[in-house]
Image (cartoon, rainbow, N blue to C red):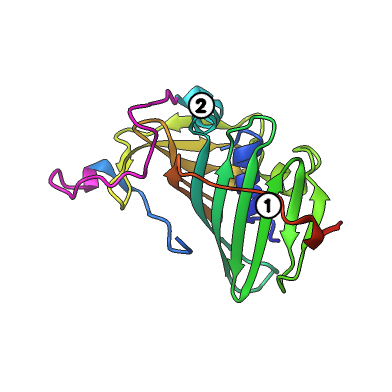
């Protein structure tokens, strides 16, 4: 698993309060760049008529509270990194399902593809299950706390992180009108551009070497631990 893996990003987003398929995530554009007679918005299914307050000074907490209330969502991720110094860029795509409906047991199901390799992860009941590359079974390990997890910890925002909202917002390629927040800190690798729709639901995140798109907020998901007969304790 790469250090900039989407597993880390989603674990952070869903489990710690951060902020199809392997298609290229929609790139945001300035609202002023989109003609007034552009095609109708094609919003993903967000809970009907419900909206959430999202402000720059409470961005992390507001995004998490909204997703927690929505309960479930599907997402797509793309990371672009150099695994070894002097090596070539490697792309990793991810298909993600998240269930936050039980505050005591946030669940994730992630399928990551890098070249010809595919890995599958399930987070539930305080454990992470990793499916072997050959698909013959699952390895079970306890989920580390945020402070002890080198992957999640890498993404935790430092104390000096700040967020500001840009003027004018933007429109995603699928027609969704969004508000644009810029997160900055003394560590440039931890900065991000965060886009929420007009209902306050997170839609798109772009950071150093990764993008994340919430494609179906409110979509039903069914995330369960693997069959115990296929699990090996790690």
The furthest residue to the right:
233
Q: Residue 62: where, in percent of width, then height?
A: 51, 26
Say whether residue 34 is left or right of residue 193.
left
Secondary structure character of the magenta stretch overall: loop
Tell me: residue 208, above or below residue 93: above
Can you give x and y, in whole percent of width and height, for residue 133 in the image?
71, 71
Check the image and report above or below for 112 versus 199.
below
Query: Which residue position is annotated with label 2?
Result: 62
Residue at (71, 50) in percent of width and height: 225
Q: Which residue is the extreme one toward the bottom?
A: 116
Q: Position of residue 167 (x, y in %)?
A: 32, 33
In the rendered image, residue 44, in percent from the top left (x then y), is placed at 36, 45
Comes first in the chain, label 1 or label 2: 2
In front of the other: 9 or 104: 104
Q: Is residue 186 visible?
A: no
Check whether the beta carbons of the residues at disc 1 and disc 2 lie within 8 A of each other.
no
Q: Residues within 10 Å of mark 1 (few under 14, many from 20)?
A: many
Residue closer to the observer: 121 or 167: 121
Secondary element at image label 1: strand
Of the numbered discs in the image, which one, if any, rests on residue 122?
Answer: 1
- Magenta region, residue range: 32-54
Density class for disc 2 (Cα within 10 Å; few <14, some 14-19, many ≥20) is: many
119 versus 36 height, above or below: below
Q: Tell me: 68 left or right of 2.
A: left
């Amino acid at each position: 698993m790469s250090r900039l893996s989407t597993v880390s990003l989603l674990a952070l987003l869903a489990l710690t309060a951060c902020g199809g398929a392997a298609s290229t995530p929609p790139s945001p554009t300035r609202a002023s760049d989109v003609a007034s007679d552009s095609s109708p918005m094609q919003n993903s299914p967000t809970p009907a008529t419900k909206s959430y307050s999202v402000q720059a000074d409470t961005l992390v907490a507001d995004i998490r509270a909204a997703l927690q209330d929505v309960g479930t969502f599907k997402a797509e991720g793309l990371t672009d990194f150099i695994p070894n110094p002097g090596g070539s860029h490697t792309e990793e795509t991810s298909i993600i399902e998240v269930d936050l409906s039980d505050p005591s047991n946030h669940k994730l199901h992630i399928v990551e593809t890098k070249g010809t390799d595919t890995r599958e992860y399930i987070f539930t009941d305080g454990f992470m299950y990793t499916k072997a590359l050959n698909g013959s079974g699952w390895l079970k390990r306890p989920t580390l706390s945020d402070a002890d997890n080198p992957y999640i910890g890498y993404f935790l925002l430092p104390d000096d992180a700040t967020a500001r909202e840009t003027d004018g917002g933007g429109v995603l390629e699928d027609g969704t009108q969004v508000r644009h927040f810029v997160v900055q800190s003394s560590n440039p690798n931890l900065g991000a551009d965060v886009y929420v729709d007009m209902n306050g639901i997170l839609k798109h995140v772009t950071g150093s070497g990764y993008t994340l798109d919430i494609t179906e907020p409110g979509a039903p998901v069914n995330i369960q631990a693997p069959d115990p007969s296929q699990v090996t304790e790690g």
